[in-house]
Image: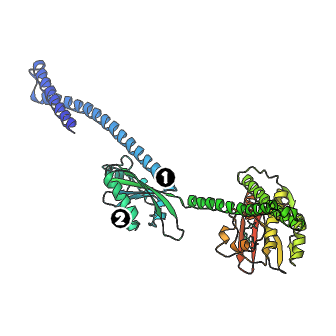
Amino acid sequence: MKDLAKRVWLVTLAALLIFIVYETIKTILFPNLSVISSHVITVIVVAVMTFFVSRYALGRYSLAHDEIQRQISITEDSNRLLAGVLATMREAVIIVDSRMRVALFNDAAARVFRMPLVEGGGPVAQSGGKDSSDSRKRSDNPVAPVSFSLPESNREYRLTDVTRDPAINAAFSRVLANKNPAELKVEMADRNQRSFQLHIAPLGKDLAVGVLFDITQLEKLERVRREFFANLSHELRTPLTAMLACSETLISGAADDPANRMRFLETLHKHAKRMSELISDISDLSAIESGQVELSLKPVRLRAAVAEVLVLVESRLTDSGLSFSVSIPDSIVVQADRTRLEQILYNLIENAVKFNRHGGSVKVSAEESDGQVCVIVEDTGVGIPASDLPRVFERLYRGDKSRSRKTAGTGLGLAIVKHLVHAHGGELSVSSELGHGSRFRFSIPVGAQAAEQTG
Ligand code: ADP
């Protein structure tokens, strides 16, 4: 500004000097010039000079104007970019000012804290798209050149309006006061019981930015992992303890007693077999989970695959007095790995037999729609408690009843089935009524040949 005033003075002085020189030269060169002619010449000279000076000034002004426009468009572009990034971020972002007012929040934060979103994708997206006068108005904001705040149409939020959690409020005021980042775990007491890791960092002179990472899924996986190892050691310890006891009894004399020897050896064999099944299921599951199992997908006639499995469970069906019915049109062909499809069917049918009541029934049916075949295995057995339903597909999960009834099984069957169904591009689900039976349903793509015929 000072520089500009100096320039104005200099230009005025220069104009005065030029005018004095001009008058002097004119008087020397044309001493007898009439007043009118002198004025006419002066007007012409002034007009010519004004023309050149204005042209020069306008040129400079237009350059400056172009530069300002360029800067404004860069700022607008970065605002739009930042707004887009913030709006599409999965992490919730919230910026709080020194008076604990919410200066900015993105769509994810609006969802987490249940703040109303304004039209056009939320406050961030709107302020990002606003005109340049808006950004200029806020040029004193320390987050310049990109600065947002809630649009005028939106009401002003204080952090205490947004969250009642005293820990979050205290952490933001600490960061604003000390200018040191903070980190804390936050539990949202909503229907979904979500957990977040909140990172707060100072931003500029008097703002603090908080980013919330949703760790609900991570915590769930961690719980499943912990339970898996707890269950695994339990599942291994039981047969091992029995095997140790049997072998010790045999060593301490029972081996010489022909009547007892056979009994202990059979028990030993039974538990060794169970351990071997468990280990083979675990390695099978981990191979499927890590994608090491290659599926050889071919058109398979579903009815034939079910018939193959039926042979394996036939004796147990008779022992338990169960009736078995199949309702699968002969024309249904699925695109599957035959061995793995039979493994899926075997696990589901075996469970339907194992968890049934004496004299009950097992039914396998299938129907085709929209390029998928939906297979249903239902039984009239013990059923699964509603609280256990979401967990039946977890590794080593065994319902309490089945554990106490000592049914044979590793608790890995359904986890294997789930992964195999997913590997075939299908979905697996279960519904059950305690005491009345269960219904397992999985989908699998229609076989290539069948699709060609129907298409
Ligand atoms: P396993 O059968 O070896 O115990 P699964 O993974 O196949 O392991 O099944 C896990 C648990 O789910 C079973 O222990 C049982 O509690 C429950 N379950 C599975 N299928 C049925 C069924 N058809 N009826 C009742 N409960 C079932």
**Tag count in the figure?**
2
Residue 396 circle label = none
Closer-to-camera residue (182/307): 182
Q: Position of residue 273 (x, y in %)?
A: 81, 60
On the rendered structure, is 401 left or right of 223? right
Q: Quadrant of the N terminus?
A: top left
The quadrant holding residue 435 is: bottom right
Sequence order check: which comes first, mark 2 or mark 1?
1
User: Which residue appears farthest toward the top when viewing the image?
Assistant: 29
Residue drawn at x 79%, y 79% as measured from the top left: 380
Task: State how the image is colored.
Answer: rainbow
Residue 84 circle label = 1
Query: Label 1's element?
Result: helix
Q: Are marks 2 and 1 in contact (CB under 8 Å)?
A: no
Q: Position of residue 395 (x, y in %)?
A: 69, 62
* Real-space Cα separation, disc 2 to disc 1, in angstroms: 24 Å
Depth-wise, is mark 2 or mark 1 nearer the camera? 2
Q: Is residue 333 above or below residue 437?
A: above
Closer-to-camera residue (359/228): 228
Query: Label 2's element?
Result: loop
Residue that carries the numbered disc 2 in the rendered image: 158
On the rendered structure, is 10 left or right of 139? left
Q: Position of residue 297 (x, y in %)?
A: 82, 54
Closer-to-camera residue (362/262): 262
